[in-house]
């Protein structure tokens, strides 16, 4: 029985989203279990807290997606997040006007991202080594400057966001949604988005096509830094003090969400909608365990199992796709003879 063209087209489109669909099914299964066992999970206040707590993670995961799409990785974001948060808190405490904090936060993040971008993009050093070094360097530098002390005595208008104001909550969540939407649109419609995919798929082919891989890699690291700066600002304004050790383990959360959301760790394939699903899935597990009456210490183990399953699935699907491509090429060659 033959498949009609419209149906074949729909199947092809679904096949392109199979990794995102897998993550969405896992998320839906988690929500179904929680809905049956602990329906109290679905209160407006709990869902709002989940969205608020994961808004910063989503912003950083968006940046991590861009970096990973080029075939690179950035594991320094946890320390960059801490530097951005502490810098914003220090500026606010020293009397810098609130409207100036946003450009300052973005600038601090962009500078740190640019350093990574120069070392990886232009000096062609391995990104995992560079960002691992920067992870340690920024954390130790921050510890030396602050001596481990938190940034306290923040001005009242800065703390206003941290007192649970509905407008501020909507602003923080809305900002992450707007950035996600803009990023997804840019990846799909702008030349720079296609260049990011091209560099991640085949850097040399992209260069022959007139794309500068060095410039694209530098750009995504700068964007990563800008988003970390924005996340640091939105997180810092939520509390009455800024801890010097904030952002610990954040790099793993962001990268895990990207991988679970279907972006290939080798670059060239992935979408921000998958990253959103990955952040939602991993960000919900901890709270869901609490409502299900399971020891929260299982959270990391479950997250690790999900990440491992995503990596194995990605590897298996990649081999299957390679096998199908090779088989089709052989059939095409046989048909020509």
Image (tube, rainbow, N blue to C red):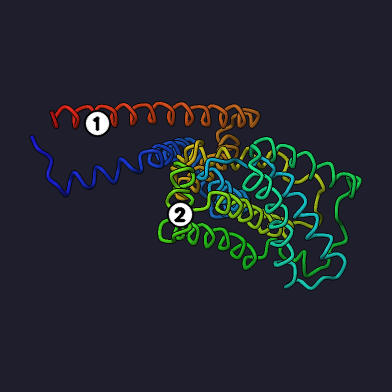
The N terminus is located in which quarter?
Answer: top left
Residue 329 marker: 1
Q: Residue 159 carries which label?
A: none
Against 199, residue 155 (above or below) is: below
**Residue 244 placement, left or right of 176:** right
Q: Name the element at disc 2.
A: loop
Residue 211 x/y as whole percent = 48, 53
Q: Nearer the viewer, residue 79 or 302?
A: 79
1 or 2: mark nearer the eye:
2
Q: Which of 155 and 35 is in front in this view?
A: 155
Residue at horizontal 25%, vertical 27%?
327
Q: State the residue at coordinates (43%, 29%).
A: 313
Residue 6 sits above or below residue 233 on the image = above
Left or right relative to 275: residue 112: right
Q: Which one is in front, 208 or 224?
A: 208
Q: How crowded is mark 2: few (under 14 residues within 10 Å), some or many (20 or more)?
A: few
Q: Position of residue 170 (x, y in %)?
A: 59, 64
Residue 49, can we see it?
no
Label 1, secondary structure: give it: helix
| Numbered label attached to residue 210 | 2
Q: Quadrant of residue 256?
A: top right
Marks 1 and 2, how far apart at CA: 28 Å
Relative placement, left or right, of 248 versus 244 is left
The image shows residue 64 at horizontal and vertical percentages of 58, 46
Residue visible at 55% across and 42% down?
A: 284
Label 1 Cα crowd, 10 Å radius (few <14 / some 14-19 / many 20+): few
Task: Give the quadrant of residue 32.
Answer: top left
| Residue 34, above or below 61 | above
When the figure is inspected, residue 265 is found, relative to residue 209, above or below; the finding is above
First in sequence: mark 1 vs mark 2: 2
Rendered location of residue 226, percent (x, y):
65, 58
């Amino acid at each position: 029985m033959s498949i009609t063209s419209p149906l074949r087209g729909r199947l092809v489109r679904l096949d392109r989203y199979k990794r995102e669909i897998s993550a969405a099914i896992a998320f839906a299964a988690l929500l179904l279990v929680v809905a049956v066992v602990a329906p109290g999970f679905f209160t407006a206040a709990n869902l709002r807290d989940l969205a608020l707590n994961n808004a910063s993670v989503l912003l950083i995961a968006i940046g991590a997606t861009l970096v990973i799409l080029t075939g690179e990785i950035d594991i320094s974001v946890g320390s960059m997040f801490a530097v951005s948060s502490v810098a914003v808190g220090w500026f606010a405490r020293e009397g810098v006007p609130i409207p100036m904090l946003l450009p300052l936060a973005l600038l601090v993040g962009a500078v740190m991202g640019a350093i990574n971008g120069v070392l990886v993009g232009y000096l062609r050093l391995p990104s995992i080594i560079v960002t691992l070094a920067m992870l340690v360097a920024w954390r130790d530098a921050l510890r030396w400057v602050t001596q481990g002390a938190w940034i306290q005595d923040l001005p009242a208008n800065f703390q206003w966001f941290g007192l649970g104001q509905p407008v501020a909550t909507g602003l923080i969540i809305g900002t992450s949604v707007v950035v996600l939407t803009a990023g997804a649109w840019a990846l799909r419609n702008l030349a720079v988005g296609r260049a990011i995919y091209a560099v991640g798929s085949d850097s040399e082919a992209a260069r022959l096509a007139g794309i500068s891989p060095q410039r694209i890699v530098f750009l995504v690291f700068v964007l990563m830094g800008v988003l970390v700066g924005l996340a640091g600002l939105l997180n810092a304004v939520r509390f009455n003090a800024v801890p010097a050790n904030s952002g610990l383990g954040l790099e793993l959360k962001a990268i895990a969400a990207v991988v679970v959301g279907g972006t290939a760790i080798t670059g060239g394939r992935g979408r921000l909608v998958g990253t959103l699903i990955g952040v939602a899935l991993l960000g919900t597990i901890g709270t869901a365990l609490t409502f299900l009456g399971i020891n929260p210490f299982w959270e990391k183990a479950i997250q690790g199992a999900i990440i491992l399953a995503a990596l194995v699935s990605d590897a298996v699907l990649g081999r299957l796709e390679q096998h199908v491509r090779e088989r089709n090429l052989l059939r095409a060659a046989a048909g020509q003879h």
